[in-house]
Image (cartoon, rainbow, N blue to C red):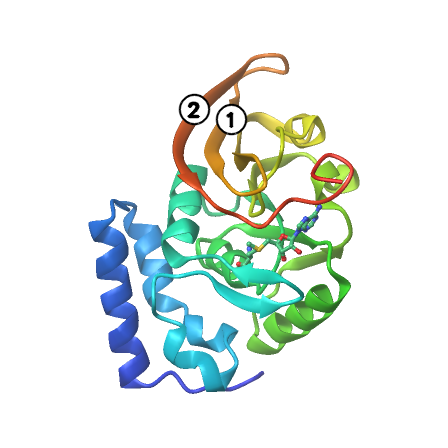
């Protein structure tokens, strides 16, 4: 297993970050504890780790970003993860969000469209001892052969809600997804009450990188 240093300084910075996120409105204690536990600087190049505890998104290569901690907390809170939930994450990216879901006790299935990121993150998280189910491909259509899922989390901005994702949700399941144009999206939470009845709730605006693929931006 990979050993990385988590110093007093890092732990202190993480506590401060949790305070900031709490002040912005995150209430779920389990989510706050997961952010307090997971060293975000592990997901940064060591030369850049001074940025790890700023409440900001940060480039991770291949034109992609590790989401802002507040955004991770907001999406995770909306998802209402229970231990043992089978969760599909679209957009593995750095692996930070997937690791947070794992810490909350979920069985995490995560899919990434960029081969280099997929390879790098799978290798890195496995070395850290964080075992997720990793897939490479277009997650805008979900993973039909692994469905159904209790929860689905999309971490890239979609033009519309992909119907495939709704189909792959269990009854009672929740889909959290930012939907809008390429620059600005509204966070939506869709709850599948029955096979045909979906309740949609709308939350604040965010700015994600685009969800590409067959049911995303082409
Ligand atoms: N969850 C990530 C994290 O914790 O670092 C942040 C994700 S980043 C904001 C969005 C990710 O979605 C990028 O890595 C991008 O390559 C990926 N992506 C975009 N379209 C996708 C698709 N159709 N299927 C899977 N991943 C996709």
**Furthest residue in direction top, as rendered:** 196
Q: Nearest the camera: 185 or 15?
A: 185
Determine whether the residue tagged by mark 1 lies in a helix, strand or loop.
strand
Where is 109 relative to 172, above or below? below
Which quarter of the rendered picture does the N terminus lie within? bottom right
Where is 61 relative to 101, above or below? below
Question: Is the C-beta separation of discs 1 and 2 under 8 Å?
Answer: yes
Left or right of 91 in this view: 23: left
Q: Residues within 10 Å of mark 1 (few under 14, many from 20)?
A: many
Percent x, y for residue 163? Answer: 69, 26
Q: Residue at x 56, y 84 (%)?
A: 2
Where is 64 relative to 213, above or below? below
Determine whether the residue tagged by mark 2 lies in a helix, strand or loop.
strand
Q: Which residue is mark 2?
A: 201
Q: Which residue is mark 1?
A: 190
Q: Is residue 80 visible?
A: no
């Amino acid at each position: 297993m990979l050993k990385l240093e988590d110093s007093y300084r890092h732990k202190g910075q993480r506590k401060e970050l949790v305070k900031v996120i709490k002040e912005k409105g995150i209430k779920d204690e389990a989510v706050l504890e997961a952010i307090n536990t997971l060293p975000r600087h592990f997901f940064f190049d060591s030369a850049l780790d001074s940025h790890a505890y700023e409440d900001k998104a940060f480039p991770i290569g291949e034109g992609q970003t590790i989401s802002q901690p507040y955004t991770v907390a907001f999406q995770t809170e909306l998802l209402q993860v229970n231990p043992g939930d089978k969760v599909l994450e679209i957009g593995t990216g750095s692996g930070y969000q997937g690791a947070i879901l794992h810490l909350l006790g979920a069985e995490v299935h995560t899919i990434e469209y960029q081969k280099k990121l997929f390879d790098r993150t799978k290798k890195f998280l496995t070395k850290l001892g964080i075992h997720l189910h990793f897939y490479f491909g277009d997650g805008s259509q979900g993973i039909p052969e692994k469905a159904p899922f209790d929860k689905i989390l999309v971490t890239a901005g979609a033009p519309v809600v992909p119907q495939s994702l709704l189909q792959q949700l269990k009854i009672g399941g929740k889909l959290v997804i930012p939907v809008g144009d390429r620059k600005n999206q509204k966070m939506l939470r869709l709850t599948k009450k029955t096979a045909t009845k979906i309740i949609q709730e709308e939350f604040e605006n965010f700015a994600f990188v685009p969800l590409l693929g067959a049911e995303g931006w082409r």
